[in-house]
Image: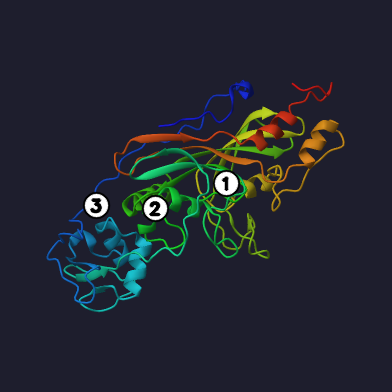
Amino acid sequence: MRIQRPFPDELKFDFPFAETFEPRAHSPQPAAQGSSISLVSSVTAMQTDPVSEKQEAFTYDAVSTDVGKRLDQVLSARISECSRALCASLIQNGNMRVAGCIKKPGYRVRLGDRICGSIPPPEPVLLEAEPIEIEILYQDDHLIAVNKPPGLVVHPAPGHRSGTLVNALLFHCPQLGAINAVLRPGIVHRLDKDTSGVMIVAKNQSAHNHLAAQFKSRKIHKEYSALVYGEMESAAGAVTRPIGRHPVHRKKMSVNSTKPRDAETLWQVEKRLAGVTLLKVNIKTGRTHQIRVHCAAINHPVVGDPVYGRAKLSPKMPGAVLTVLSQVSRQMLHARRIQLSHPVTGEYMTFEAPVPQDMLDVIEGCMINELTGAHT
């Protein structure tokens, strides 16, 4: 495994505070009760689909541990190749039925319910593989860790049909096209376009489901470096304000949303600079724009954030610092470390990505003694 330091040796900081944000110990999830559905040898009998031999069919009789649970929940727990979202879609489309009848994904399963269905082959990915250079930190048959550079969109969306990380991954890992996600094959989490750092991508559907479950259960440890405006009043703290869509500007997130979701951000001072502070940030939840929104909410917006940050440039700052900060063109936020359990071996793994040069330049430019104006 390739492990990299978030900062080069010459920028290592003396950090007097204890490391308080240790990753939680991994506890393997207990196996689901009852038999799982195999698409090669089903629980009761394999059915041959007369319409398409490419569709993998199954029949399953509900057992006592399934009673009262949602249909999509039961099936996703029994079929490792099928996520809950995919199960819900297939149920709605009639690909999975109870006693031959179409049910809703939220149908409550009864003892002895005979559930029959088929999983169609993955839709062809309507994306082109592009020879975009990406830094691969680690890869095996099940996952790949990459260092996403700033400015690279993670997956296609309106206005960004090409030139994304997904296009690059399809070039380096063609097997991603077999994962049931037409526009986001393998993607289990995201970083904003102008946020840099380590990302984990699944190489097959089973790994995708396992990693997605770790993210959902908050068993994955994520650590960021954030350069924020102002001087923090304390050495560490937490922001727990819920986050949701902005009540007026629907493309923005806000702590004043009418429908917020819980969010928790832990921060710790790493270096106090001229007019700005370098933080180590851990997020316990993964809300859209969470770090940027929470930093802005405590009046310390991320430097360079064009959406949530307003440049807090003071005439008291050294001239060289004012020059550096006025030229920042993106948010100074970097995903420097991620820790997770391997989807197959269960090994607890750590991946790190070095801070990009543009962010290092800003940090160095702010390392100035406020009294003498000299670089420290």
Q: Which mark is residue 32?
A: 3
Q: Which of the pair 303/174 is nearer the observer?
A: 174
Occupied quadrant, residue 81: bottom left
Q: Which mark is residue 174?
A: 2
Residue at image position (39%, 49%) is 202
Q: Which dot, 2 or 1, sits closer to the camera? A: 2
Q: How far apart are labels 2 and 3 at the CA level?
A: 32 Å
Residue type, label 3: Ala
Residue type, label 1: Thr
**Quadrant housing the C terminus:** top right
Say what secondary structure mark 1 lies in.
loop
Q: Which dot, 1 or 3, sits closer to the camera? A: 3
Whole-percent x and y of residue 303? 71, 42
Q: Residue furthest bottom?
A: 101
Q: Residue furthest front?
A: 131
Q: Which mark is residue 240?
A: 1
Residue 113 lies left or right of residue 135; in this view the side is left
Q: Give neighbour class at mark 1: few <14, some 14-19, many 20+ (Cα, 10 Å).
A: some
Residue type, label 2: Pro
Q: How far apart are labels 1 and 3 at the CA level?
A: 33 Å
Occupied quadrant, residue 318: top right
Say what secondary structure mark 3 lies in.
loop
Occupied quadrant, residue 140: top left
Question: Total number of numbered labels?
Answer: 3
Q: Give neighbour class at mark 2: few <14, some 14-19, many 20+ (Cα, 10 Å).
A: few
Q: Earlier in the sequence, mark 2 or mark 1?
A: 2
Say what secondary structure mark 2 lies in.
helix
Residue 37 lies left or right of residue 88; in this view the side is left
Q: Which dot, 2 or 3, sits closer to the camera? A: 2
Residue at image position (55%, 31%) is 6
Residue at image position (46%, 58%) is 184
